[in-house]
Image (cartoon, coloured by chain):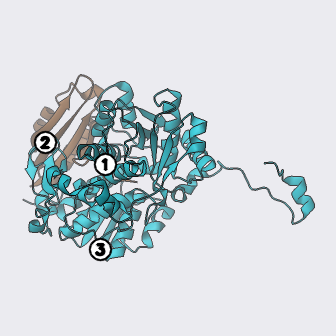
Chain colours: A brown, B cyan
Amino acid sequence: MTQMRLHLTFPEERVREPIVYEICRNFPVVVNIRRADISEDSGWMELEMDGELADLERTVAYLRDRGVVVAPIEKSILEG
Amino acid sequence: MNRPSAPHRESDSTRGENVANASAGSKIKGLKCRECGRLYPAVAMHICEFCFGPLEVDYDYEAIAGRLSRRSIEEGPKSLWRYHELLPVTGAPTVGLHAGMTPLVHAKRLGKLLGLDNLYLKNDTVNHPTLSFKDRVVAVAMTRARELGFDTVACASTGNLANSVSAHAASVGMKCFVFIPHDLEAGKILGNLIYHPTVVAVRGNYDDVNRLCSEIGGEYPWAFVNINIRPYYAEGSKSLAFETAEQLGWRVPDQVVVPIASGSLLTKIWKGFQEFSKLGIVSSNPSLRVNGAQAEGCSPVYRAFVSGKNHLVPVKPNTIAKSLAIGNPADGFYSLDVVFKSKGAIAAATDPEIVEGMKLLAETEGIFAETAGGVTVASLKKLCEEGRIGRSDLTVAYITGNGLKTMEALTGALPEPVAIDASLSSFRKNVNPSN
């Protein structure tokens, strides 16, 4: 099993969609939301996901395909 | 649990520390979650295990107040370490002994052009040893890392941070790993290679580099300065506020203008002024306004400010100001909060405006700043034009890196030399002596 800690940012067009439900239904991963702030037109969520590495990577790819910005919990690490 | 992809696990990232030493300093109580307030020992960790909020150093201000005074500061070394009491290290500094105490320049000629009578520039283009403000944060991060028992330091950077980490590691013989995207221009890494770190060029885009570094930060017993050492690293930026206040004759300015990349610099400058006020080193200045400066091509904090929201939308950076090109800034929300709280503002500069800002600074004050300095000057100009900074306001703008690092930004932007034959007649014909 592998664990990822992620920061997700939801664009306005996705903020009303049940995306966490979708990933739990479509992929064998365990999602644990730790912190979130969602408003009418934007939002973010910090969560940990447990599962097999390949499943986690497919989940991340799915989220990105759906327009969600997926970053490690530290967000941008690469600095100038 | 097998965790090859775990972006971050504190139990691993704290390896190599000397925990007894970590909690021994009488001024550091530990680390505290900025969101839920949970307390942790002062070890190498950066995220709250409970809510994933960022951790900050928790100081014992009562103990510090008993030892800190203007006099004790003035008797200290001519470096940022004169503020040792308010920096998160427990023993004597061991890395970056000459960082900080850069000039605070009274910018009369630039001020006159902008309509400001009291404009000052904090000139970190001459910071030691690598000519940017990163020498401050790295000096503090690496001193703390050594206290915690690390012998290896790492960072992910395309510029100033890599320079500073590589140079400081070389100066004390620490092993050093620098991660860069594989397609970074060769010239960008030469300034690192001279210090002989291990430079790892990662095949993939910026997101891939971020993710890999997050994983490595959790897997290897290294001091990753802006991951597991981040709470200490970030505190080094407070020294910019401390020096500003001291160099102004123990005063807090009315307005500051600070470039925003991760947002940490802005929040720590604010914190530095707050700490000095709280400890009675300076009188508090309730009218202090903290203003931000971003490059328009990477301006998630500016956009949130303009829209009046506290949610940041990450962006793909597209600007010549590479040192500010952080599309998903870790402290973006907190920097926005400081700007709102202090009734400041944020301005953004286009690439041509950045170049004009660099030229204006050089032509009026003789300071050659990198593109981030151009962002700051261009944004300062806009804030003045918008009437957000008044003529008599005591204003300080932070110039954070040297222009020699971003020469490519000026290609085609400067006049050609006047070419003449080696004769007096050719000189008279081609050169106007009244220029």
Amino acid of disc 2:
Phe
Residue nearer the viewer, B409 or B293: B293
Give the distance between the C-alpha atoms of the residues marked 3 and 2, in whole angstroms.
41 Å
Label 2 packing within 10 angstroms: few (<14), some (14-19), many (20+): some
Q: Which residue is mark 3?
A: B175
Q: In the image, which is nearer the foreground, mark 3 or mark 2?
A: 3
Q: Which residue is mark 2?
A: A27
Q: Are labels 3 and 2 assigned to the same chain?
A: no
Residue at coordinates 31% horizontally, 51% vertically from top-left? B238
Judged left or right of residue B66, residue B434 is right
Residue at coordinates 33% horizontally, 36% vertically from top-left? B285
Above or below, A34 against B362 in this view is above
Q: Quadrant of residue B34?
A: top left
Residue B199 spot, x, y in % from top left: 37, 68
Q: Quadrant of residue B329?
A: top left
Give the distance between the C-alpha atoms of the residues marked 3 and 1, in whole angstroms.
24 Å
Q: In the image, which is nearer the foreground, mark 3 or mark 1?
A: 3
Residue nearer the viewer, B267 or B76: B76
Amino acid of disc 1:
Ser
